[in-house]
Image: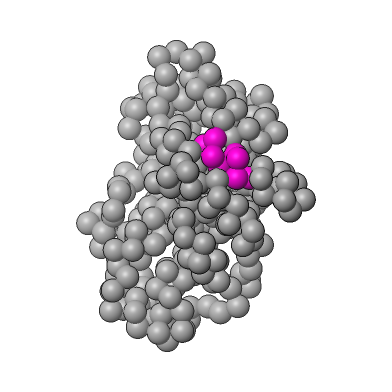
Amino acid sequence: MAQLTLQSAVKLNSGYSMPLLGFGVWASPGHLTAQSCVYALQAGYRHIDTAQMYRNESEVGDGVREFCKQSGVKRENIFVTTKMSAPEASHDETMTALKASVDKIGLDGYVDLFLIHSPRSGPEGRQALWKAMEQLHAEGKARSIGVSNYGPSHFEEMRAYAKIWPAVNQIELHPWCQQPKVVEYCEANHIAIQAYCPLVRGEKAQDPTLIRVSKKHDKSWAQVLIRWSLQKGFSPLPKSDNPARIEANKAVYGWELDEEDMKELEGMHQGASGALVRVAE
């Protein structure tokens, strides 16, 4: 395995590179989001994940602009993802909603990645939103487009209408919910995998196996879970509004989990019952 660093990235099928370690802002309060993004970017993160339903796209843009102003780092070196769940009543209204997100984020008129947040709008809804996202891409407002919570059947459905193949699938992934069929499909079809809930929202912090592995490496349980995700080839999206935790969550380099560790952690898979949010079908 190539040595992982904070600068490690995956080349998407769109031609762009996506930093592997991301920073999530789900449930981040509006008054904290911008500063949390600044903390993360100061710590070295270069990938931030938001969504329309998080209601903090504007604050993410504020944080990125503030960091770039302070640091001199160019906007093009920050990878920003957002998501939309379902299409509006018409194509034009859907385009308006997509462009509204780009405008709220306000970073040189584009986002790096726009995802369909959920497949739950049904076959017609999924197709309508994807066609709109393809137009957004064609207009240069989304450098890459992809999906979230999609299973193999959703991708196979897309073959009938997609002119652009999804660059990313964002799904729940951690040792208790490994979604092997979806992962295998994505890897075989050149779709990068983002892992949400990589820290299981702290619910497994006292798991005996996780504690044992963390003590073995003198690392926190959170660092072990992020490292597991990175070694699996995923792009984990840990979130926090605590500066110390933001810093700690990126201290996952210069050491690695060995084969025994990975086997132990992978042995904790619980299928659908291990999911906090949902499994892709």
Range of magenta residues: 57-64
* Main SS category, magenta section: helix
User: What residue appears at the point 30 percent right and 47 percent down from the top-left corner?
Assistant: 278
Q: Residue furthest front?
A: 31
Q: Residue furthest bottom?
A: 216
Quadrant in the picture for the C terminus? top left
User: What residue appears at the point 47 percent right and 60 percent down from the top-left corner?
Assistant: 242
Residue 63 lies in the magenta stretch:
yes
User: What residue appears at the point 70 percent right and 33 percent down from the top-left corner?
Assistant: 108
The answer to whether residue 228 is visible is no
Residue 104 rendering spot, x and y as whole percentages? 56, 30
In the image, taking residue 93 as reference, residue 150 lies left or right, namely: left
Residue 10 rendering spot, x and y as whole percentages? 62, 55
Quadrant in the picture for the N terminus? bottom right
Residue 228 rendering spot, x and y as whole percentages? 45, 69
Between 102 and 144, the residue placed more toward the observer is 102
User: What residue appears at the point 60 percent right and 40 percent down from the top-left corner?
Assistant: 62
Q: Residue furthest right?
A: 72
Between 221 and 185, the residue placed more toward the observer is 221
Residue 58 lies in the magenta stretch:
yes
Residue 54: name its quadrant: top left
Residue 53: name its quadrant: top left
In the image, taking residue 274 as reference, residue 138 lies left or right, namely: right
Q: Please tell me how many numbered marks the rendered image carries.
A: 0
The answer to whether residue 263 is visible is yes
Residue 199 rendering spot, x and y as whole percentages? 39, 62
142 vs 277: above or below: above
262 vs 19: above or below: below
235 vs 133: above or below: below
